[in-house]
Image (tube, rainbow, N blue to C red):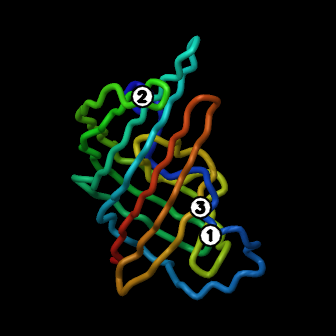
């Protein structure tokens, strides 16, 4: 729990999506996502694994959670190469499940409530098209999942359906004995 609270979340982060490894200069972009959008929601699932090795014992703790944001507000303005958030705010209010293993044998399971109020943010994030339905954020993604950092490179798949824009992200961050994974879906509605 402490690790989640200490780790900054909001904008998805690291792993390139499988479909997102093309050079943008070779990519034909069919989606016109430019415009101003109202932030409708952020849904996600997270998994954080920490492993400790002690003499003759391996202790692994796995934290999992699923959530849909509440108290959503703010706008995102998108131009050819930049996404700009204005007064973007939401609340993650969920239950985290903890599983503790010793030498791969489940020893304990418990739950805890997790609340993360995200204060209004004003952020600019550059993006590049890397496939006809995927973008790459080289410096920052501005939606936070509560477990991965938001200030690392990120990739996302984009889907435009009527006046709704869907941004799908999978992030994974590895440290020596820790692994954080998140899958998020952001829904924006064109104004």
Q: Quadrant of the C terminus?
A: bottom left
Image vertical order of residue 67 relative to residue 49, above or below: below
Q: Mark 3 or mark 2, which is nearer the start of the sequence?
A: 2
User: Measuring 30% from the left and 38% from the top, which residue is drawn there?
Assistant: 96
Secondary element at image label 1? loop
- The residue singled out by tag 2 in the image is 101
Image vertical order of residue 94 relative to residue 4, above or below: below
Secondary element at image label 2? strand
Q: Nearer the viewer, mark 2 or mark 3?
A: 2
Query: In whole angstroms, how far apart are the C-alphas of marks 1 and 3?
Result: 14 Å
Residue 103, visible in the rendered structure: yes
User: Measuring 54% from the left and 84% from the top, which residue is drawn there?
Assistant: 31
Q: Mark 3 or mark 1, which is nearer the start of the sequence?
A: 1
Residue 87, visible in the rendered structure: no
Nearest to the observer: residue 133 or residue 125: 133
Q: Position of residue 64 (x, y in %)?
A: 36, 42
User: Measuring 51% from the left and 57% from the top, which residue is drawn there?
Assistant: 170
- The residue singled out by tag 1 in the image is 81
Q: Where is residue 61 in the image (x, y as percent from the top left)?
A: 43, 29
Secondary element at image label 3? strand
Mark 2: give few (<14), some (14-19) or many (20+) Cα within 10 Å.
some
Q: Mark 2 or mark 1, which is nearer the start of the sequence?
A: 1
User: Measuring 33% from the left and 64% from the top, which residue is drawn there?
Assistant: 39
Q: Which of marks 1 and 3 is in front?
A: 3
């Amino acid at each position: 729990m402490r690790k989640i609270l200490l780790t900054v979340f909001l904008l998805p982060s690291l792993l390139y999506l499988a479909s997102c490894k093309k050079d943008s200069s070779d990519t034909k972009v069919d989606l016109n996502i430019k415009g101003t959008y109202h932030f409708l929601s952020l849904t996600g699932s997270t998994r954080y694994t920490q492993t400790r090795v002690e003499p003759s014992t391996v202790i692994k703790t796995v934290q999992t959670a699923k959530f849909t944001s509440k108290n959503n507000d703010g706008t995102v303005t998108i131009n050819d190469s930049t996404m700009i958030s204005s007064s973007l705010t939401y609340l993650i209010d969920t239950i985290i499940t903890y599983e503790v293993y010793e030498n791969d044998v489940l020893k304990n399971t418990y739950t805890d409530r997790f609340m993360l109020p995200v204060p209004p943010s004003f952020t600019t994030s550059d993006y590049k098209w890397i496939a006809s339905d995927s973008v790459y954020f080289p410096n920052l993604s501005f939606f936070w999942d509560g477990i991965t950092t938001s200030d690392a490179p990120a990739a996302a798949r984009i889907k435009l359906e009527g006046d709704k824009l869907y941004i799908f992200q999978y992030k994974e961050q590895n440290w020596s004995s820790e692994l954080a994974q998140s899958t998020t879906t952001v829904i924006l509605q064109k104004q």
